[in-house]
Amino acid sequence: MRSYLEFEKPIEDLEVKIEELKRISDGKDINLTGEVKKLEKKVRDLRTEIFSKLTPWQKTLLARHPDRPYTLDYIPLITEDFIELHGDRRFADDKAIVGGLARIKGHPVVIVGQQKGRGTKERIKRNFGQPHPEGYRKALRLMELAEKFKRPVVTFVDTQGAYPGLGAEERGQAEAIAVNLMRMARLGTPIVSVVIGEGGSGGALALSVADRFYMLEHSVYSVISPEGCAAILWRKNGELGPEDFSKAAEALKLTAQDLLKFKIIDDIIAEPVGGAHRDVEQAAKNIGDKIVVALEELSQKTPARLVEERYKRLRKIGGLAGEA
């Protein structure tokens, strides 16, 4: 059953009506084809209108949509010959991060991504996409393997943040993230990162130090969630509400459009109208095409040049207006 967000209610009403008309006419002499086609066109026009005017908070909700494709949804559509690898060789295999060897249109790569899980059982197994330290060490092990065998690295970012629990802190959560940032900055192989949903805090940053950094059209990327930001800035005695989260999302400038404007990302990958979950195959094709173009460009550069240009790219982030 398809899930709808609150701002999609007008679309839901029309699609329910279309399904009812199809059921009424199915196997009977009643011909409602013309009426159905009119409503379908109305739905398409309405969806285009609504999704062209989404607020930052609505984009945040869309990035978290329960039907939104996750890393393991995209991998079979984008890659060939995927072989998943497990474990960090120190503590455990963190199911919140998946990765392994694959090919993307003939290009051999190592792919790493965060996996939230769909359904209660899998979400618990994947820890709701919140990696532990061993998850980041697993990711780093795979990236170092890529460097050793001269394979580019492709990462998919989709997490509300690294797991903040006591066990994760005891095992060195902050250190694991910091080591990833340092090591990725010096990795002698191309790195392409794509935010496919929610990019939250250092948990997302640990997989997004890259030569080319992209975001899906309705994904978000921020140092803190709108709820967390609102709780810090505006909570007094009463409860926070959607209007507070909306205000925080606007202030955070967390949308792909904002981050492209600030030159944090290199480009925006278009989604099907209504979000990636409306046409997963088309969304995957858009992602795959963008990755291939980046890999073909980056494969021409030496390891030393990659590291040098990556360093310069990172140094520009947060620069004052007018700086080179």
Image: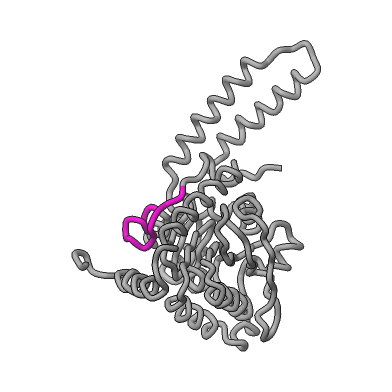
Residue 169, quarter of picture: bottom right
Q: Which residues are magenta?
A: 257-269
Q: Residue at x 49, y 55 (%)?
A: 291
Q: Position of residue 275 (x, y in %)?
A: 54, 45
Residue 40 visible from this viewpoint: yes
Q: Which one is in front, 205 or 184?
A: 184
Residue that protrudes farthest toward the right in the picture: 27
Q: How many marks?
A: 0
Residue that protrudes farthest toward the top in the picture: 29
Residue 164 visible from this viewpoint: no
Is 293 contained in the magenta span? Answer: no
Q: Residue at x 38, y 52 (%)?
A: 257
Asked whether, in this view, residue 206 is left or right of residue 254, the answer is right
Residue that protrudes farthest toward the bottom in the picture: 170
Q: Quadrant of the N terminus?
A: top right
Residue 24, quarter of picture: top right
Q: Quadrant of the C terminus?
A: bottom left
Asked whether, in this view, residue 251 is left or right of residue 283, the answer is left
Is 266 contained in the magenta span? Answer: yes
Q: Position of residue 106 (x, y in %)?
A: 57, 55
Vertical position of residue 194 compared to residue 86: above or below? above
Q: Residue at x 64, y 67 (%)?
A: 100
Asked whether, in this view, residue 84 is left or right of residue 62, the answer is right
Q: Residue at x 53, y 41 (%)?
A: 274
Q: Position of residue 66 (x, y in %)?
A: 63, 52
